[in-house]
Structure formats: C-alpha cells, structure tokens
Image: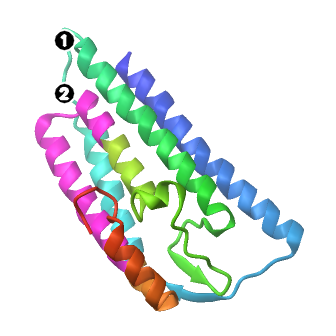
C-alpha cells in the first residue's frame, strides 16, 4: 500500500515539472522569444547526479515490512510528501518562464524573492529533500536512508553553491542582500 501511495505522490510531484516544462516551451514558441544565456552553472549538473544517486538508494534498498507500516509513520510521511508537492509546485509557478532544467541565468532573468522564495532561496531542492525523506522513511533500510540523504545533500550543496554564484554575478547587490536574509534550502543553512 505504501509503495503505491508513494508512486502516486512522485507522479503528482513529477506532473508539476512536466506541466511547467510544456507551459514554458509553449509560451516561448508562441512569443517567438529567445533569451541569450549569460551564465550556466555547469557544476550544478554534477550535483544533480549526486541527488539522483541519493534518491536511487532509498528506492533500491528497501526494508521488509512484515507487519505493515505503523499508521502514524505512514501519515507523517504522506503529510511530508503532500507539503513537498505543494511547495515544489508553488516554486515552479512563481518561477514562471524562468524555470529550466539546467541552472541558467539569461539576459532577461529576474531575481525571484517572493512566494516560496521568500522562505528559502531554493525551494525546489527543499521540496525534493522532503520527497526523499518521505520515501526513505517508508521504504528504505535505515542505512540506505542515511547514506542516500547524505549523498543527496552533498549534491544539493553543489547545486546551491553553483547557482548562487551565477545569480551573484547577474545580480551582485540584490542577490547579496537576499542571500544574507534568506536561507538556502533548509532553515538553518545559508
């Protein structure tokens, strides 16, 4: 049962990204708009691979549940997944046409600091971390959750630092102030 619910949660989470990707492509095509790439955070791609490895660990090394999952644990994990889905979707919506798969800053890029971006600078990474925790809590062996989370966070740190560097180059004054006042992706990390 938990596996089916998690698959549904991940499908809903992914649906937001597919929908946003199609929406962005359609609008760019309709407007005939092309943006000139100013900065690309190449190191972010390496971080993405580590994040995927961390997620892979929690899905691959599953613990047996002979007596089923305790109801409280299931509800807590599902609540975290639901919050993560909503937070990720809200971040995508706020980014609008600026959302891209790769970490790119273009000539028409705007620094988004409202909505979920007022709480953390990288809410999509926060939502993905929540999905990993929800999944690992219900499915993974304890060691796989711990290792998967550590690898995921290492990848996220790489991505955050790479993306912060390109945003700081594009918005030197405003990004510095934003960075000082808003945590990266977890409340205690700047």
**Image coords of residue 34 (percent x, y):** 77, 81
Query: From this viewpoint, is residue 104 visible?
Result: yes
**Residue wearing tag 1:** 66
**Residue wearing tag 2:** 63
What main secondary structure does the magenta stretch of the protein show?
helix
Residue 155 drawn in magenta: yes
* Depth check, front residue: 165 or 183: 183
Residue extent of the magenta highlight: 133-162
Question: What residue do we see at 45% from left, 89% from top?
Answer: 173
Q: Quadrant of the C terminus?
A: bottom left
Q: Secondary structure at mark 2?
A: loop
Q: Residues within 10 Å of mark 2 (few under 14, many from 20)?
A: some
Question: What residue do we see at 66% from left, 57% from top?
Answer: 21
Question: What residue do we see at 50% from left, 74% from top?
Answer: 103
Q: Residues within 10 Å of mark 1 (few under 14, many from 20)?
A: few
Question: What residue do we see at 41% from left, 65% from top?
Answer: 121
Judge left or right: residue 158 versus residue 10: left
**Image coords of residue 52 (percent x, y):** 36, 55
Q: Secondary structure at mark 1?
A: loop
Report the number of discs.
2
**Image coords of residue 108 (percent x, y):** 68, 82
* Depth check, front residue: 175 or 57: 175
Label disc, if present, on residue 40 of the rendered structure: none
How far apart are labels 2 and 1 at the CA level?
9 Å
Instruction: Give above or below for 163 relative to 39.
Output: above
Judge left or right: residue 65 versus residue 156: left
**Image coords of residue 117 (percent x, y):** 47, 61
Quadrant housing residue 14 = top right
Q: Quadrant of the N terminus?
A: top left
């Amino acid at each position: 049962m938990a596996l089916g619910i998690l698959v549904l949660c991940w499908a809903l989470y992914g649906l937001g990204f597919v929908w946003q990707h199609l929406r962005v492509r359609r609008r760019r095509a309709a407007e005939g708009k092309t943006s000139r790439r100013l900065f690309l955070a190449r190191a972010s791609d390496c971080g993405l691979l580590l994040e995927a490895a961390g997620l892979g660990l929690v899905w691959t090394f599953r613990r047996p549940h002979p007596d089923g999952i305790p109801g409280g644990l299931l509800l807590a994990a599902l609540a975290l997944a639901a919050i993560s889905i909503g937070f990720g979707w809200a971040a995508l919506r706020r980014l609008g046409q600026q959302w891209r798969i790769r970490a790119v800053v273009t000539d028409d890029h705007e620094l988004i600091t409202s909505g979920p971006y007022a709480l953390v600078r990288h809410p999509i990474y926060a939502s993905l971390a929540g999905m990993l925790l929800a999944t690992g809590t219900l499915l993974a062996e304890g060691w796989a959750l711990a290792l998967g989370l550590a690898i995921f966070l290492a990848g996220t740190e790489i991505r955050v630092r790479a993306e912060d560097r390109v945003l700081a180059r594009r918005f030197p004054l405003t990004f510095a102030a934003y960075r000082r006042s808003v945590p990266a992706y977890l409340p205690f990390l700047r």
